[in-house]
Image (tube, rainbow, N blue to C red):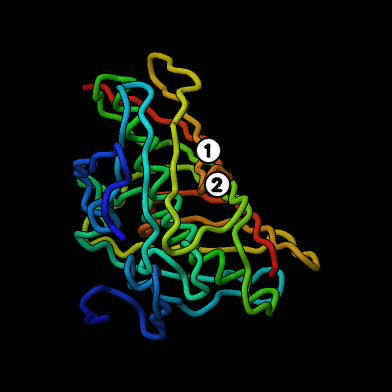
Amino acid sequence: MDKAATGLPDGAEDISTGGFNRFAGPFYRLPDEGADENRVRRFAFVVLEKHMNGSGSVHGGLLMTFADIAMSRTSRLASGAKSCSTVALNCDFVGPGRLGDLIGIRVRVSRQTRTLVFLTAEISCGERVLMNAQGLWRIA
Amino acid sequence: MSGAPDGFGEIALIDPFEIHVGPAWTKGEKGARAYAFRVQEHHCNMRGVVHGGMLMTLADMTLGQAVWDATDNAPSVTLNMQTQFLKSAKEGDLIEVVPELTRRTRGFVFMRGDFTVAGEIVMTVQSVWKLLKE
C-alpha cells in the first residue's frame, strides 16, 4: 500500500508480519506520545473494502481485532515480555467508521503488576470517536 | 478442513469482513440455533493460537445472527461487547456456540454466548445490541 496516499504519517511501521494480523491488516504502529506513566502508544490502519459490514460501516469485529492487536502489543512493550494474552476486553461502539478512513488508536497502561497489565484505549478517526476499550492482559 | 460438520449448513454471510474470515455454519431452529467455526492457519497468531480478534469477530457474527432471529431481521448495531478469554484454541479446533437471548426490550437486545471447543469453554461473551428505527 502507498503510505503517502492513505494519510499514514512518516514513521508508520507495518506490524502485520504474519498470521491473522496480516490476514486482517495491514496495521501500523505510530511513534509514541509522551513518556513514562504518561506514554500513549499509537497505532493506525486504513479501512479497506474487506473490513466492512453490510451496512457500509467498519465491521465491529475488525475494530475489536485492531484494539486487541494494539493493546496486546502495548502490553508486551510495557512489560518487556515476549508474549501477553488477552484475559478480558470490554468494548463500547460509539460511532461508525467508513471506507477509506484513516483510523487510529491511543493506548494507555492504567496499571501494571508482575503478571498483569491493565489497559484503556480509544479508537478514533480524526476528532470522531469510534470505540472505547478497556482490557486486562496476562503476562505470559 | 473447511468442510461443514455433520448436520450443519453454511451461513450465507453478507458482511465483507465476515466473508473474508469465514466460512461459518449453523444448524437447528430459529431462536435455538447452534453455530460452528473451524480454526484455520490464517485465523491464528504467530504462536499458533487463534487470534483474539478472530474470536471476537466470530462472537459478533454469531450473536448478531441470533439477534436477527430474535427481531425478525430488524436492523441493529452492536453497542457493547464484553469478552473473557478462558482458554486458547488452535488450528483445526471446531468452535461452537448456542447464543442465548438474555432480554429484549423495545430498543435493545441483550445476548450472551459460551464458545466451546470439545465441550470446554474457550471464550464467554455478553453483548448489547441497539435496534435501529426503520
- At x 39%, y 68%, the residue is A20
**Residue nearest the viewer, comparing A88 with A47:** A88
Q: Where is residue B25 in the image (x, y as percent from the top left)?
A: 29, 43
Outermost residue toward the right in this view: A114
Q: Is residue A21 left or right of residue B125?
A: left
Q: Position of residue A133 (x, y in %)?
A: 53, 51
Tell me, yes or no, whether the two marked residues, 1 and 2, touch with CB atoms within 8 Å: yes
**Residue nearest the viewer, comparing A121 with A135:** A135
Q: Where is residue A37 in the image (x, y as percent from the top left)?
A: 71, 69
Quadrant position of the N terminus of chain B in the picture: bottom left
Instruction: Look at the picture and state if A92 lies above or below A121.
Output: above
Where on the picture, by quarter, is residue A108?
A: bottom right
Q: Mark 1 points at which residue?
A: B114
Q: Give how far apart the Cα atoms at labels 1 and 2 are.
A: 6 Å
Give the chain letter at badge 2.
B
Q: Where is residue A97 in the image (x, y as percent from the top left)?
A: 30, 51
